[in-house]
Amino acid sequence: MSDQPAYRFAVNVTPKPGILDPQGRAVEKSLPHLGISGVSAVRVGRRVELTVQAADATAARAVVDRLASELLSNPLMELFDVEVLA
Amino acid sequence: MTARVGIVLFPGSNRDIDAANALEVAGAEPVRLWHESVDLEGVSGILIPGGFAYGDYLRAGVIARFSPVMRAVAEFAARGGPVLGICNGFQVLAEARLVPGALLRNRGLRFVSRQVAILPDRLDSPFTREIGDRRPLRMPVAHGEGCYYADEATLDALEADGSVLWRYANPDGSVAGPDAPGNPNGSLRGIAGVSNAAGNVAGLMPHPETAVEAVLGSDDGLGIIRSLVVSAAEYAATGRVAGTKQPAGGAA
């Protein structure tokens, strides 16, 4: 397996629209203390970076998609998107 | 006949001793089930205790979902066996999709450890049958991610088919909605615990197992533990539990 090419990805997981995000709200409430105004709709998520060894980019991407939907995010409350990293 | 009830042990479980004591007080024999084993040792009921399984890394309960023992628990549940998850055990069952919904970060962002009161929605389920009468039950909560969430259509369906088993109560005995003082975490519609559609798998955030003797401050939780034990004994004797439906398709 080790001779297969390696692909690097990032999975960004964010709370679904409409789901209360108390962390985002807490961040937002802290902004006046920094003298910052005009910032709203803060949503706090999670970013997971990982390397996948697979036969080709398509196969690697399939692994990441499965991992993202079954483990890294809970589809009831979160959305995810996958970035291909250099 | 003494019912044998399994207690699932993950790395990070920490309410297992309380769970074992509660099962003994309720007249059952507790049997420890290690997370790396798929052998349920012939138990006829399962309790998934609280704690921080696998450190609650990533999301509470999610890593535990993929452990060998949970494959066996899912098969046991698909055959109609009674399973109760408490606190972190509820989070594990929700991540495993064995009960509906999800547990979000508490609305107030803080870990909440205090006494609450919960009201049973119904008294004929495998997990509420020994409660007796419908009154607020006092027991502690201790969690950071206990805010029950499902979308509105799912919540309506859960209420319609009797899957809501317990709700947080205010001091005046009314149901505590998300912003009410009796609701510790913002749970939608005050939901503290739910069951699956078949009715044989349930989860709840408060800790009935630490409220089973007056010396612990409350014995209001004993009815819930005793309900599990009676259901486990019934399942051992008959292969069924009263009030449950046959699971559809057995897909766990």
Image: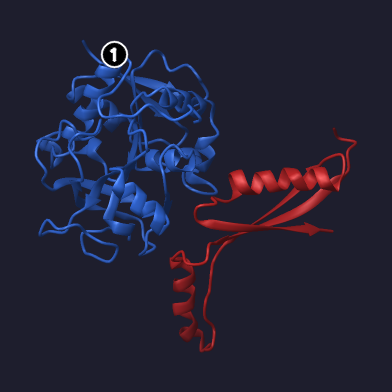
Chain colours: A red, B blue
Q: Measured from the top left, where is residue B8 in percent x and y? A: 40, 27
The residue positioned 31% from the left and 42% from the top of the image is: B163
- The answer to which image quadrant residue B246 occupies is top left
Relative vertical location of residue B160 with respect to residue A40 in this rendering, above or below: above
Pick the quarter of the image with the N terminus of chain B.
top left
The residue positioned 9% from the left and 39% from the top of the image is: B133
Name the residue that disc number 1 marks: B238
Crowding around mark 1 (Cα neighbors within 10 Å: few <14, some 14 to 19, many 20+) is: few
**B206 left or right of B133 in image:** right
Q: Measured from the top left, where is residue B207 in percent x and y? A: 26, 41
Chain at numbered mark 1: B
- The answer to which image quadrant residue B17 occupies is top left
Q: Is residue B186 visible?
A: yes
The residue positioned 41% from the left and 14% from the top of the image is: B41
Q: Measured from the top left, where is residue A1 in percent x and y? A: 85, 32
- Three-letter code for the amino acid on which mark 1 is drawn: Thr
Relative vertical location of residue B145 with respect to residue B250 in this rendering, above or below: below
As helix, strand or loop, the secondary structure at mark 1 comes to helix
Relative vertical location of residue B109 with respect to residue B60 in this rendering, above or below: below
- Of residues A42 and B52, the one drawn nearer to the viewer in this rendering: A42
The residue positioned 44% from the left and 72% from the top of the image is: A26
